[in-house]
Amino acid sequence: MSPSQQQSDAGEFQDPLEDYSHKTYDDPLEQALADQPVASIQATPFASIPPDTPIQEAIQQLAKLDVACFLVELDGKLVGVFSDRDILDKVALDFEKMKDRPVSDVMTKEPIFVYDTDSSAAVLSVMAVSGYRHVPVLNLDKNIVGIVSPQRVTGFLQQNVEDK
Amino acid sequence: MGLHQNMLNEPVSRLALREPVLCKPEDTLREAIKQMQQAKLGCVIVVDEQSKPVGMFTENRLTQLLTKGPAPLDDAISTQLDENWPCVQTTDPVVDVLNAMQSANVRFICVCDEQGRVTGLTGQKGLMEFVADHFPGQVMVQRVGCAPYLDREGA
């Protein structure tokens, strides 16, 4: 067996992290996702609450603002995410018992986030891999700059599909 | 073929469809919520005796209900259905899922066969997985750098 054959046989799996060079895509939508930063997906406005907000009050605010998710913020830093999934899982069947407790009791702690300089493809991959629908966007100082929601991602995709 | 063409040409059946939580119209809200919790899903599809969808109840609707106090857990689920619940067929192109989500401002899309029976559920996660397939490097970064894969569709 020649060295090149050995290389070929052993190289069936190509580690996608091996190549750090800028990749170009034939497909314009893939190129847009790879080139455009998260900032190009609409990430603002975003809604945030402090961690001691009572659950009932947070629910009222979610409904009033017609959003599905709050960023939970303490001193300008992200400490959690409170969404309608937390309400479904931890509040819905025990509302009377839970309504006056702080959102910090039921929020998703240490949420997965992206930096505003990451590629758009990165935030979609976070959604695909983690299953989280709402992904906070931070700057390099770890300050909150926004949130990417399902509606904003589909808007970005639809715009790029229509543009091509 | 690239992502753009694949979205226009590939059928919805190419998406990783999720097993939907199905309820009968007379099931209670409490039963529906328990099933949603167990399945880690943010919606249930209410079907008739022929497995054809008659409505959808989502976590968004649940949040709206809780603004008025405790949810009416013993009410029939059929009294609490969402107004917007788009359906696509398994043979429709993937881009129809994108358009349905965007135009109706929903996260879950009911998938039916050609006879109109529910065969699956898709939405944001299915669509993101389809897109992410084209970016294996980004997916690898997530798997290496973040928490292990979670079997959930939410938050």
Image (tube, grey):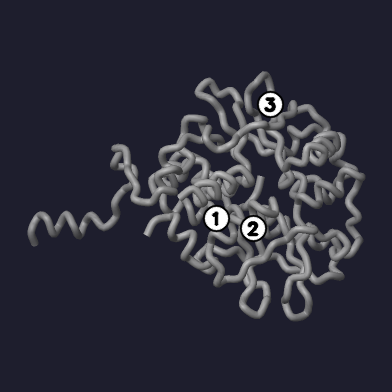
Q: Quadrant of the N terminus of chain B?
A: bottom left
Q: Amino acid at mark 2?
A: Ala
Alpha-carbon distance for marks 1 and 2? 12 Å
* Residue B10 visible to an observer of this rendering: yes
Alpha-carbon distance for marks 3 and 1? 29 Å
Picture quarter containing residue A102? top right
* Chain letter belonging to callout 3: A
* Residue A110 visible to an observer of this rendering: no
User: Going from the N terminus, do you reach mark 1 or mark 2 first?
Assistant: 2
Q: Amino acid at mark 1?
A: Leu
Alpha-carbon distance for marks 3 and 2? 33 Å
Say if A148 sits above or below B11 in the image: above
Residues packed near mark 3 inside 10 Å, few (<14), some (14 to 19) or many (20 plus): some
- Tags 1 and 2 in contact by the CB under 8 Å rule? no
Picture coordinates of residue B125, whole percent (x, y)? 58, 53
Q: Amino acid at mark 3?
A: Glu
Secondary structure state at the residue bearing disc 2 = helix
* Chain letter belonging to callout 1: B
Say if B51 sits above or below A140 in the image: below
Say if A116 sits above or below B61 in the image: above
Q: Label 2 belongs to which residue?
A: B100
Q: Label 3 belongs to which residue?
A: A73
Say if A51 sits above or below A28 in the image: above
Residues packed near mark 1 inside 10 Å, few (<14), some (14 to 19) or many (20 plus): many
Secondary structure state at the residue bearing disc 1 = helix
- Report the front residue among B53 and B18: B53
Q: Label 1 belongs to which residue?
A: B127
Picture coordinates of residue B22, whole percent (x, y)? 73, 68
Picture quarter containing residue B53? bottom right
> Viewer-nearest of labels 3 and 2?
2
- Tags 3 and 1 in contact by the CB under 8 Å rule? no
